[in-house]
């Protein structure tokens, strides 16, 4: 008897095609580290540094380290960016700049370029890309950022003060399967911004000073309880097709209206940005927009420096912004800051209009020393 067997299998089996995508994304932030009375930091010693406060980008914590007597050599000032917390092998590119006087211009980022424009001088160094790691390389910067002799000359016209500006971009990479459905971020705010700009379907006119703004009553009512009362409630005016707003600058109302439609802050300022932001804060309080009020107050708090401290303090005191006033007094109470602030024109104006504020400043300084 003969035995036989056979082996069979599916022939010509073809698997489905697959694909994936490498997505590279970036998140950028800017941090300003102000240094006052720099000459008093000399003599700390080579390798000794002072640090900025911690700032965050893409879930990573960073700070700036300034070596007044250099990290390795006493002839230069050294500046480094340091990763304090984050994932291993964090990739980033960044620039570090020295700003003097009122120079807010971003200018050129070409390595080593110095710029003089009448407002101030800037020295910039740029790192195109670096991988930060806690074990391998947690910080990156320049041992010879600027010569001490050169920095002394630059400080002559800036009250012995400067600001280190770090513009940091964190790079992230993730691999996405092609079968994944990518949901784009919401663009609702863009649609509402366009609706405000185009004024399609606008049914109410708002007169502020010499300007007229077209708006949509249901948007105003949904976003602002004061407008809701004026248009539909107990404060309803006889003519709700045209509202008139007193005691407010048109530019302030324009930024207020922008926030109502987009839930974001317009970065267009006229004149002193601190004064403009304080006026927007007051308008936000007037119309019950708490989120806008807190955004403005936080912006002002972050803008406190030698040049602006007196202006912000005066406005905060005048309009009873307790937390903002406290932040200003706390800044001025830092050792050696008061002298630099007192040399500004805004401080002279503040004392002339409100001499009693000096008593509060001295009280804060005394309590800071006691602490």
Image (tube, rainbow, N blue to C red):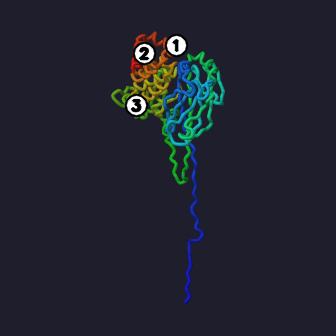
User: How far is mark 1 from mark 3, CA to CA?
Assistant: 43 Å
The residue singled out by tag 3 in the image is 224
Disc with the residue nearer the chain's start (3 vs 2): 3
Return the x and y of residue 362 as percentages of the image width and height. Answer: 42, 14
Q: What element carries label 3?
A: loop
Q: What element carries label 1?
A: loop
Quarter holding the C terminus is top left
Q: Is residue 139 above or below residue 179?
A: above
Quarter of the image holding residue 109? top right
Relative to the observer, which residue lies in front, 205 or 170? Answer: 170
Farthest-out residue, bottom: 1
| Residue 191 in view in this figure | no
Return the x and y of residue 219 as percentages of the image width and height. Answer: 43, 34
Crowding around mark 2 (Cα neighbors within 10 Å: few <14, some 14 to 19, many 20+) is some
Quarter holding the N terminus is bottom right
Relative to the observer, which residue lies in front, 316 or 84? Answer: 84
User: How far is mark 1 from mark 2, CA to CA?
Assistant: 15 Å
The residue singled out by tag 2 in the image is 361
The residue singled out by tag 1 in the image is 343
Crowding around mark 1 (Cα neighbors within 10 Å: few <14, some 14 to 19, many 20+) is few
Disc nearest the viewer among 3 and 2: 2
Task: Name the disc covering residue 166, or none.
Answer: none
């Amino acid at each position: 008897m003969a035995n036989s067997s056979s082996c069979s299998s599916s022939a010509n089996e073809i698997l489905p095609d697959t694909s994936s995508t490498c997505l590279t994304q970036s998140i950028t932030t800017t941090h300003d580290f102000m240094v006052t009375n720099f000459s008093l930091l000399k003599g700390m010693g080579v390798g000794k540094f002072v640090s900025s406060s911690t700032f965050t980008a893409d879930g990573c914590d960073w700070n700036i380290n300034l070596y007044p007597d250099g990290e390795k050599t006493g002839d230069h000032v050294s500046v480094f960016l340091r990763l304090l917390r984050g994932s291993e092998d964090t990739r980033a590119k960044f620039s570090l700049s020295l700003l003097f006087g009122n120079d807010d211009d971003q200018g050129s980022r070409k390595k080593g370029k110095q710029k003089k424009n009448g407002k101030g001088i800037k020295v910039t160094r740029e790192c195109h890309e670096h991988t930060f790691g806690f074990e391998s390389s947690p910080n990156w910067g320049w041992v010879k950022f600027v010569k001490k002799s050169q920095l002394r000359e630059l400080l002559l016209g800036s009250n012995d003060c400067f600001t280190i500006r770090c513009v940091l971009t964190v790079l992230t990479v993730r691999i996405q399967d092609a079968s994944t459905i990518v949901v784009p971020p919401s663009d609702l705010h863009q649609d509402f911004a366009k609706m405000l700009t185009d004024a399609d379907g606008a049914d109410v006119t708002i007169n502020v000073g010499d300007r007229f703004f077209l708006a949509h009553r249901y948007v105003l009512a949904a976003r602002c309880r004061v407008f809701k009362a004026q248009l539909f409630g107990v404060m309803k005016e006889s003519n709700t097709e045209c509202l008139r707003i007193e005691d407010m600058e048109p530019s302030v109302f324009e930024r207020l209206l922008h926030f109502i439609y987009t839930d974001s802050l317009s970065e267009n300022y006229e004149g002193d940005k601190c004064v403009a932001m304080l006026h927007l804060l007051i308008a936000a309080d007037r119309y019950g927009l708490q989120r806008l009020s807190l955004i403005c107050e936080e912006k002002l708090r972050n803008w406190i420096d030698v040049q602006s401290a007196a202006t912000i303090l005066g406005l905060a005191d005048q309009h009873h912004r307790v937390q903002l006033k406290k932040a200003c007094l706390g800044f001025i109470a830092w050792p050696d800051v008061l002298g630099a602030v007192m040399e500004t024109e805004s401080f002279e104006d503040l004392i002339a209009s409100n001499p009693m504020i000096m008593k509060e400043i001295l009280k804060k300084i005394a309590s800071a020393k006691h602490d």
